[in-house]
Structure formats: C-alpha cells, structure tokens
Image (cartoon, grey):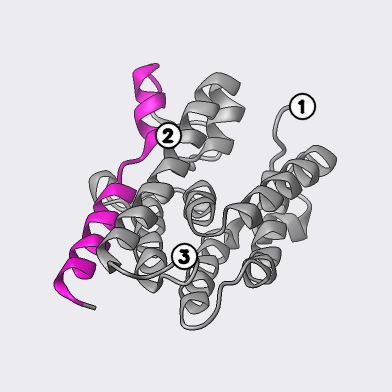
Amino acid sequence: MDISAVLAVVGSYLLGSVDFAVIVARSRGVDIHQVGSGNPGASNVLRTLGRGPAAMVLVGDALKGVMAAMIGWIAAGDEILPNSSVALAAGLAAVLGHCYPLYHRFRGGKGVATTAGVLTFVVPVAALVLAAVWVVVVRLTRVASIGSLTVVALAVPLAWWRGLRPPSVWWLVAILALVVFRHRGNIRRMISGSERKVPT
C-alpha cells in the first residue's frame, strides 16, 4: 500500500471508532453498556430504547462502512469496483474500529451494520439481497444474531456472484471472520437456548 492507502485505512479505523449506539443512548441519558445485553449496537438499542433510536444507530453505523470503503476506493486511484482491495481494507479498518473503538476504551459492537455499509458500497446488489435475508430471518426467529450469522454465511458467495475476486475477496473474508468472532458469546447462547430476542 502507498501512503494514501495507509492514511485511508488509519482514517477509516478512527471513523469506525465513532460509536453511534453510545452517542444516541447518551443523548437520552442512558449508558448503553449498562442496559440490556450491554452491547453498544443497534439490536441492544432496539431492545432498550425503541425503534427510533435503533434506526438512528443502524444508519449511522452503516454509513461508517460506506464512507470508509469510499475513502479507500478514492485513495486507490484507478481501481474499479468491486475489486478494490484498498476499499475493502479500509472497510475492515472501519469494522475493527467499530468493534474495538479507540474513543470508547475498545468496548464496541459486533460490526454487522458497518459491514453492511462496506458491502453496500462495494457490491450493492449483493448487499440488498443480504439485507432482505436478514429481515426475513429475524422476523421468523426474532433473534438478530441468527440473522447476522446467516448473512455472514451468504456474503462471500453473493459477493463472488457480483464479481468480487481475490485478493479483494480475502479482505471480505477477514471482515466476516471478525464479525463471527464478535458473535462468539451469541453463538454460545444460541446453543444453550438463552439468546435474547428482539421485540416484535
């Protein structure tokens, strides 16, 4: 990577570190780390503060991914989407920032919405299909993490269908691996049958 790509990746991490769940909850006098599951993400905001605040968090976190991928793509210069490795590397940095935010003592969310933002910029048709799948699965199961992990499983095949190829696809695999790692507690709870449900 040249210096512009490195700066794009570093900037994307700092952008990803802006946690909208913390900001939105704090604006309502709530410490999101102390309510519900304690996770600073849209699902916990939905369970504890309602749909309006959750929608604000979801949009904000997704926009971080869109902006990070766009910054990386611009820094790459002549690369053509979807196979812009720098766009996806910057996207990974944004997701990493969301999961381990510099501004919030590295206590972040699961990275799903920010990953969705990255995919929306890089492979928009695949992202639209994945969003529809997430909605259907969550409506059927009322468990956000099942929807998220289903989307993770489908993301690479759908991105490949839309033209994503190595080495760019490996950056996407790294993003998805991070999301799965951040869901390890949810996976344990799903196995034990104690995973939290979202409101209907």
Is any atom of residue 36 visible in this view? Answer: no
Specify whether residue 16 is painted magenta: yes
Q: Secondary structure at mark 2?
A: helix
Label 3 sits on residue: 81
Q: Nearer the viewer, residue 172 or 185?
A: 172
Looking at the rendered structure, the kind of residue marked 1 is Thr
Marks 3 and 2: which is nearer the front? 3
Q: Which mark is residue 200?
A: 1
Q: Are marks 3 and 2 in contact (CB under 8 Å)?
A: no
Point out residue 146 in the picture as x, y percentages from the top left corner. 72, 52
Judge from the rendering whether residue 51 lies leftward or rightward of residue 67; answer left or right. Answer: right
SS class, disc 3: loop
Q: Residues within 10 Å of mark 3 (few under 14, many from 20)?
A: some
**Residue found 52% across the figure and 46% down from its top:** 113
- Quadrant location of the C terminus in the rendered image: top right
Q: Which residues are magenta?
A: 2-30
